[in-house]
Amino acid sequence: MRKVCRSWALIMIVILLASPALGVEAGKMTPEKETAVKWLDTHAAVGAETATYIWHNPELGLGEHKSSAILQEMLKAAGFKVESGTAGMETAFVASWGAGKPVIGIHAEYDALPGLSQAAGVAEEKILVEGCPGHGCGHNLFGTYSSMAAIAIKKAMEEHGIKGTVKLYGTPSEETLVGKAFFVKEGIYKDADAVLSWHPGTENSVSYASSLAMDNFKVRFHGKASHAASAPWAGRSALDAVELMNIGMNYMREHVRPESRIMYCIPDGGKAPNVVPPYSEVWYFIRAPQYKMVKEIVDWSKKVAEGAALMTQTRMEFVPITAVWQYLPNQTLAKVGFANALLIGTPPFTEEDEKIAEPFSKSLKEEKGPFLSREFKKFEYDKPFSWATGGGSIDEANTSWVVPMVRFTGSTLAKGTPGHSWQSVAQNILQPAFKASLTVSKYMAATALDLFADPMLLEAALMELKTSNEKHGPFVDPVKDVDLPSFKLMHNVEESQVPVQTKGDMPLPDFSTLK
């Protein structure tokens, strides 16, 4: 089986290198790439220790103080210039090294998910701290190993005299689609020539796929309190307005495209049954394959909300939080990225790693191994992409319309593991996750070094971006008139009310070896 995989990989490298879109070095092992890969292997322990620290200190979006701080310290120790508070977000930062063009960026995320506290390495649900966040999307890995890739690129640039700039974009609050959307709004990518990103998962891939566009908003209704038993006629129920709006939205579902998604919850439905609720709010996520479809539904939603307010004699307040377009793939960069992923290979999992993954897969009724992916997901890189018809939404979708992007995935999780689950939290601190993440760091470093080496690749990627904007755009920033949301608006609690997993300070990893 391994011989077949190796043969297929070699064939694919030959095909990709024959493409006129790829430079002569793309997908080849060069001295520069050897330097980056060797540095990553030598400093693997630092990556694992940093990811472990962030896992033990899970923080919600815009409140990632410890997570952001440790990544900044890591990058400073490696010689990067770090500027924090980017785009008005306290936990956002940009770390830079080098000077001039080209400018290659890498995305880093580090926020956790609400209520996903789970014991490490335990293949059964076991809450550590009730109500505490947990790293169910692997952003403890994402932020750490993106930073590792950036440092490895710097080391190769130093040793081989490569001109240009590498930037690490520390972007908070991805789970609520805030960080990168507001980076775009504030023009943070204006000097970037390309941006690389990745995400933990159950497969190894270089994505040539889109994501769903999304709008994220709340509707607040303001009524009038009264005794619900003795004088209900004197009150006006804000909760009635919320319920009537939801009824209208549910009838709307029949008349929107079937690929659309309309999701809601009620963060505030009143305080007591014997009081006519004077205030209530409903929170909506609207998704569709393209943002123009999302906007049609949102515009209709506003009219439904207005109708609910009229029927209940309440006042309606529409509160935009954030919005993202669908991700725009870049074929040029996807080909370069895949050539380098094939060059590096899939994560070097062992039988011991399989034993670690097995109970997690079996907890999800996946009985047949192997339980960790040793293959690459295949995309049709030579054909036009299609808009997504399912799946999630990502804040870096907005980034992809203003700068060429490529996205990698590493098999950090056992087969069958869904994101945002306790099984995911439990695995994102284990050895297989670290191995896969380090492997993706190598993909990103090798790809970035190809882009530094061959300006024509960047020119081709930019030309493709311009052509895509002409064909599918033009991109209109959906948050250009939206204020940066507060922590409470996004999470419905004050930051001080969020339970903490680690009491006191954990010791920081030793970053002295990064100098």
Image (cartoon, rainbow, N blue to C red):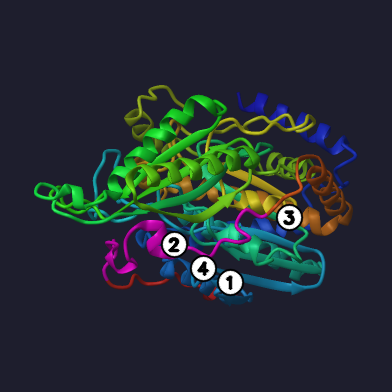
Give the number of the disc on residue 86.
Answer: 1
Amino acid type, mark 2: Glu
The magenta stretch is: 477-503
Q: Nearer the viewer, mark 1 or mark 2?
A: 1
Who's the residue at 74% across and 65% down the image? 190
Amino acid type, mark 3: Val
Lower position in the chain sequence, tag 2 or tag 4: 2
Residue 356: x percent and y percent? Answer: 38, 39
> In 3D space, how far apart are the residues under numbered discs 2 and 3 (Cα atoms)?
34 Å
Residue 2: x percent and y percent? Answer: 62, 28
Residue, disc 2: 49
Who's the residue at 34% across and 66% down the image? 495
- Badge 3 crowding class, 10 Å Cα cut-off, few under 14, some 14 to 19, many 20 or more, is many
Residue most extreme to the left: 230
Amino acid type, mark 4: Leu
| Viewer-side residue, 109 vs 63 | 63
Residue 61: x percent and y percent? Answer: 44, 60
Amino acid type, mark 1: Thr
Who's the residue at 59% across and 38% down the image? 204
Residue 379 magenta-drawn? no
Lower position in the chain sequence, tag 2 or tag 3: 2
Whether 64 is drawn above or below 229: the answer is below
- Badge 1 crowding class, 10 Å Cα cut-off, few under 14, some 14 to 19, many 20 or more, is some
